Amino acid sequence: MRRQIVHEGADQLTYEIRGIVEIAQQVCDFGVDVYWENIGDPIQKGEKLPEWMKAIVGELVSDDATYGYTDTQGLLGAREFIAEQVNRRGGVQITSNDIIFFNGLGDAVARMFGFLKREARVIGPSPAYSTHSSAEAAHSGYDHLTYKLKPHDNWMPDLDDLDKKIQYNDSIAGLLVINPDNPTGAVYPRDVLERMIEIARKHQVFVIFDEIYSGIMYNGARTASLAEVIGDRPGIALRGISKEFPWPGSRCGWIEVYNQDRHPMFKRYVSSLLSAKRLEVCSTSLPQYAIPRIMGDPRYQDHLEKRCRMYEKRVNRAFDIFKDVPGITVVRPRGAFYMTVLFNPGALTEGQCLDIANPEVRALIEQKVKGVKPDKRFVYYLLGATGICVVPLTGFCCELEGFRLTMLESDDERADMIWNTIAQSITSYLALA
C-alpha cells in the first residue's frame, strides 16, 4: 500500500484472557471437556440474577422509553441516582454532570487512553489487568509502564517503586489503581490509598481508580472509594453493573469525574471524552433505566452481602487446597473473584510436562509450548492434560510466573474437583524439575 495504515501501538493490543480461548477451543474440538477458568463471567459459570431483578428488567422491556436514545452522558435519572450514592459516602461531592456512561468499562478505558496525548503516559500495577495495560500501551506505542505489587505483602503496591518511577519519568501524567484488584484479589486499605494519592499530588499527576469490584469484598477487607481519599486531585473512578448485579452482557459502565472544575486542562480532557461520545450518540439505554430501580431497591444490599459471603466461602476453600502445595505461593484474596497462584523462583524448568492421553491434543500442546514463557508452558500442559483453562500470569504485563483462575464455579463439587486437579497437576509438573 502507498501509506502505512497500522497504528504504532497495534502490536500492544494483547488480551491473554481471551487469547487462551483459541488454544482451548482446539482442545475442545479434539473431544476434551474444557473448564473455562479464564474469564470473569459469573453467568457463564452458573450464577443467576435474582428473580426480583429479572422482574424489574422485564417491566422495563415493556416500557417504550427504554427503546430510545438517552442523553449522550447517560440517562439523567441514572446519573442523578449515582451522584447521590457517591455523595452519601462522603468526601468530594459530584453532580450528574460529572458522570458519563459507556458501553461497558472496556469502551470507557479505550476512550480514556485513546484521547490522551500520545506522550502522556499512565502508570499502572503489575500484575496488570490486560484491558488497561493493552489500551495504555497501544495509545503510546510503547510497553505499558508499571509499578510493582508485592506478593509477599498481600499484593500491596510497592510505594517506593511507584514514587521513584513517577519522579524519574516526566512523561507519566496519570496513576492507575485497581481496587479491589484483578488479577490478585487484593484490597487496599485506606491508608495505602491515601499514600498513593499523596504521591500523585507530589508529582502533579491525575488518578484513575478502577472500582468495578467495589461491591465484592470479604475476609474482613476494608477500603475507601476514590471520592473519600482524592482530596483536590483530578481523578476518574470507573464503575459498572457487570460484576455486581451481575449483568456482564449489559455492557454498561460509567466514569465518575472528580475535581474537573479545579483543573482546566483536566476538564478539557474530560470534555474531549464527552465530545467523542456524542459521535456515538449514547450508550445502551435499557441497563441505565434499570440502575436506579435495582440499586435503589431495599433488597439490593442484602443481595451484595449474600454474594460476598458466597465468594468468601469459595475463596477460603480454594486457598486451603493450594496453600500447602510445594513450589507455589498463594495469597488469600479479599476482593473480586480471582486467585493468583505464583510459582516460586526456579520452580519451573524447560523439561517439565504433564501426561496428555489424547494423542492429537498432545501433538497440539507440544507444538504450542515451543518458545513460550515457563508459566504459559504449564498453562498449556494443564489445558491439554485436564481441560482446565487458566491464564498465565506473564500475560498480565508481569515478570512473575504463575497463573490466574476464577472463583466463579457455582457447583461446589465441580469447583473442588477443578482446584484439586490443578493442585495435583502442579505437584506432578514440578516433580520433573
Image (spheres, grey):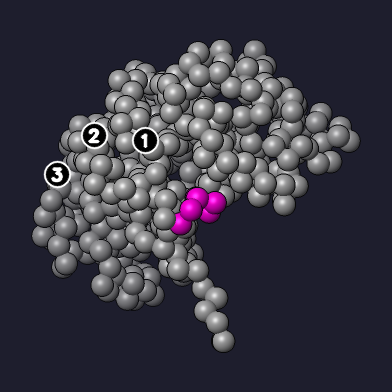
Q: Residue at x 70, y 43 (%)?
A: 283
Q: Nearer the viewer, mark 3 or mark 2?
A: 2
Work out whether 312 lies above or below 366: above
Residue ranking furthest to the right: 64
Q: Position of residue 198 (x, y in %)?
A: 32, 27
Question: Where, by quadrant of the figure, is residue 197 drawn?
Answer: top left
Q: Is residue 115 magenta?
A: yes
Q: Position of residue 127 (x, y in %)?
A: 31, 46
Q: Which residues are magenta?
A: 113-118
The residue lying at 37 percent from left, 74 percent from top is 364
Whether residue 90 is situated above or below residue 115 in the rendered picture: above
In x, y percent, where is residue 226?
45, 26
Disc 1 element: loop
**Crowdedness of circle 3 by 10 Å Cα count: few (<14), some, many (20+)?**
some
Report which residue position mark 2 lands on: 159
Q: Secondary structure at mark 2?
A: helix
Q: Is residue 202 left or right of residue 94?
A: left
Q: Is residue 64 left or right of residue 272?
A: right
Residue type at mark 1? Gln
Residue under label 3, please give it: 326
Nearer to me, 378 or 182 = 182
Q: Main secondary structure of the magenta part?
A: loop
- Whole-number angstrom distance, CA of label 2 to CA of label 1: 16 Å
Q: Nearer the viewer, mark 2 or mark 1?
A: 1
- Can you name the residue that lies furthest to the bottom here? 2
Between disc 3 and disc 1, whose residue precedes?
1
Quadrant of residue 231 in the image?
top left
Which residue is labeled 1 in the image? 204
Q: Is residue 58 above or below residue 295?
A: below
Label 3 SS: loop
Q: Is residue 130 visible?
A: no
